Image: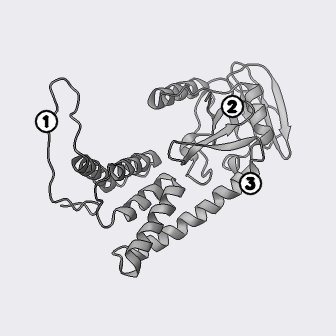
């Protein structure tokens, strides 16, 4: 069955050279390859955000070849970007689709509904941004999208926006997030580092203190009262308005929001984590 994303009259299958390096395709064929890849991925209908981030990149790369795009391309890009949490891209693509195709567009109602959703989520992002003050800012990718990272302008550190990366929806921290033991959290940071090529790690108590002082409430609302692991073993505490963070450890300890009393935990206890990295 032909995918709804594609409207291809020709698909060339090229053999991979024996050297293991794929031959560079002409723009139209490269665009078709990326569109076919994105179409197959969309049909899987997976729920994780990274799945749709990859689809969004493939669709944008197809467009950047300069080859003509299918009639409903902007709609499918907008939907993929919305599911990826790429709000700016979603608004632009869906807006283009509605302006170009008008009320007779094949997916007019769906596009209009998705555009309204993207606008609502964009307003949620703006609300968080206004709370950053002069200390924090969104850390965007090379396309200007925000995929759950914030930057401390003073320290230069890049933080996960929520207590676990899977908890960032693209416009808010949602749900309880993920809990792991201290060794599992360290291993998760290593896996994320290997997957992204960036050195993610658990923060020190001082780094977490600095973040707590300036972190908007919207980015800790997903796990109030929950402990977050640090990479240090010493007792420490700090308060920010109504939210309190403490690291109080027997072997390795965590930091707790919205509670003034301290507890100690064995490293095998399961708590939240928020990774940090350098630029």
Picture layout, residue 52 above or below residue 278: below
Compare marks 3 and 2 and give the one earlier in the sequence.
Answer: 3
**Residue beneath label 1, please?**
15
**Tags 1 and 2 in contact by the CB under 8 Å rule?**
no
Disc 3 to disc 1, how far (Cα)?
A: 52 Å
Label 1 sits on a secondary structure element that is loop
**Residue beneath label 2, please?**
156
| Quadrant in the rendering for residue 233 | top right
Total labels: the figure holds 3
Label 2 sits on a secondary structure element that is loop
> Could you tell me residue 1's position as x and y percent?
18, 61
Compare marks 1 and 2 and give the one earlier in the sequence.
Answer: 1
| Quadrant in the rendering for residue 97 | bottom left
Compare marks 3 and 1 and give the one earlier in the sequence.
Answer: 1
Camera-side residue of 267 and 121: 121
> Could you tell me residue 57's position as x and y percent?
40, 47
- Mark 3: give few (<14), some (14-19) or many (20+) Cα within 10 Å: few
């Amino acid at each position: 069955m032909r995918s709804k994303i594609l409207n291809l009259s020709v698909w060339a299958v090229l053999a991979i050279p024996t050297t293991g390096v794929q031959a560079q395709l002409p723009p139209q064929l490269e665009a078709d390859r990326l569109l076919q890849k994105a179409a197959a991925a969309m049909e899987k209908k997976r729920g994780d955000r990274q799945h749709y981030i990859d689809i969004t990149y493939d669709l944008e790369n197809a467009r950047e070849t300069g080859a003509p795009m299918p009639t409903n391309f902007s709609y499918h890009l907008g939907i993929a970007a919305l599911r990826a949490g790429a709000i700016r891209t979603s608004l632009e693509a869906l807006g283009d689709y509605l302006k170009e195709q008008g009320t007779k567009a094949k997916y007019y109602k769906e596009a209009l509904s998705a555009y309204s959703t993207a606008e609502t989520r964009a307003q949620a992002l703006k609300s968080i941004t206004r709370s950053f003050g002069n200390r924090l800012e969104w850390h965007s990718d090379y396309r200007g999208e925000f995929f759950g990272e914030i930057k401390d302008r003073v320290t230069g550190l890049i933080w996960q926006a929520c207590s676990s990366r899977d908890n960032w929806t693209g416009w808010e921290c949602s749900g309880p997030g993920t809990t792991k033991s201290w060794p599992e959290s360290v291993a998760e940071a290593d896996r994320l580092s290997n997957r992204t090529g960036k050195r993610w790690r658990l923060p020190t108590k001082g780094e977490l203190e600095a973040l707590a002082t300036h972190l908007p409430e919207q980015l800790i609302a997903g796990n109030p009262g929950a402990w977050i692991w640090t990479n240090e073993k010493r007792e420490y505490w700090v308060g920010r308005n109504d939210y309190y963070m403490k690291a109080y450890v027997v072997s390795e300890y965590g930091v707790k929001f919205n509670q003034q009393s301290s507890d100690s935990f064995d490293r095998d206890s399961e708590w939240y984590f928020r990774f940090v990295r350098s630029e």
